[in-house]
Image (spheres, rainbow, N blue to C red):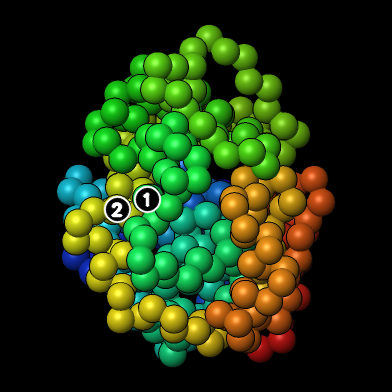
Amino acid sequence: MEIETIKHRMLQVNGINMHVAEKGDGPVVLLLHGFPELWYSWRHQIVYLAARGYRAVAPDLRGFGDTDAPPDVDAYYMFHLVGDLIALINSLGQDKVFVVGHDWGAVVAWYLCIFRPDRVKALVNLSVAHTPRNPVRRPVDSLRALYGDDYYICRFQEPGEAEADFARLGAAFVIRKFLTYHEPAPILIPKDKGFGGSPDEEIILPSWLSEDDISYFANKFNKSGFTGGLNYYRIMNRTKINWELTAPWTGVQIKVPVKFVVGDMDLSYNVHRVQEYVQKGGFKRDVPFLQEVVVMEGVGHFINQERPNEISQHILDFINKF
């Protein structure tokens, strides 16, 4: 895997200390992870892209891993997250970079392209399609109306509740539970059953995920806790939140070249009306420079780890055009 050849350093960006993993020389490809993940989610892509003439850079995003994790929910507005990336791009000495995002990293990447398209050469986003801002309803309210209070994002809203249950279960169990989820159905967590059930439950790892991988993630989350990552969900429905603050960008199109790759078993792709939006013109309307949509059969949410070689090739094929 050559993981040991990946270099690590800390950078001061936007008022926080950010851990960055990188390898290679050439045009920069910025790789943005999701929840509950780290730079490590891109381990395959880092090595692959570096071997093909690119400088792959994968930060631990604010709140994750070895990057600072401010405890206050108000430190996780989308303006903070995009601001971190702009400061990182500046620290790397770049005017423009290629961007690849997955899960929350994809959401941040969409907003990076909305706020600062001048800093992005092209975007490859995985799993989470662009969601236009709904001017009349906040996002968690919409999800609650669709799936009820047991929907995992709704259940994450109460500070401390998920953290307490994750502590009971142990970080290794939590990581194992999330990364092996491979269903198109939404994650529902009944309040009386807790987040994930019993730590004695046996969870068999798929071929693409090793015990060493679980240990790496778990060791980092044992040190940092989960609050930083959970704050991404909690900021969604605050009174002074992204939804209100991003009102000036309602209806703005994303005007950078885009490729979107998703698995047909991905719970994000199977959210109410997402497939219709992606396949029947809405996505292309809002992202007019959308050049490719790839739906991978039998693939779940953690697509860059489940199908590393194919995802690496999809990234390379697209960025090689520019």
Residue beneath the point at 29% across and 53% down: 237
Whether residues under marks 2 and 1 lie with C-beta atoms below 8 angstroms apart, the answer is: yes
Q: Is residue 159 left or right of residue 252?
A: left
- In the rendering, at what x and y percent does residue 115 appear? 37, 81
The residue carrying mark 2 is 237
The residue carrying mark 1 is 141
**Observer-nearest of 154 and 293:** 154
* Three-letter amino acid code at the position of disc 1: Asp
* Three-letter amino acid code at the position of disc 2: Asn
Residue beneath the point at 34% across and 30% down: 162
Q: Quadrant of residue 287?
A: bottom right
Separation of marks 2 and 1 at Cα, in angstroms: 8 Å
Mark 2 vs 1, N-terminal side: 1
**Observer-nearest of 225 and 141:** 141
**Observer-nearest of 309 and 20:** 309
Badge 2 local density, few (<14 within 10 Å), some, or many (20+)?
some
Q: Circle 2 — which element?
A: helix
Q: Quadrant of residue 248?
A: bottom left
- In the rendering, at what x and y percent does residue 280 appear? 71, 72
- In the rendering, at what x and y percent does residue 277 appear? 64, 67
Q: Which mark is residue 68?
A: none
Residue most toward the top? Answer: 200
How many numbered discs, if any? 2
Quadrant of the image containing the C terminus: bottom right
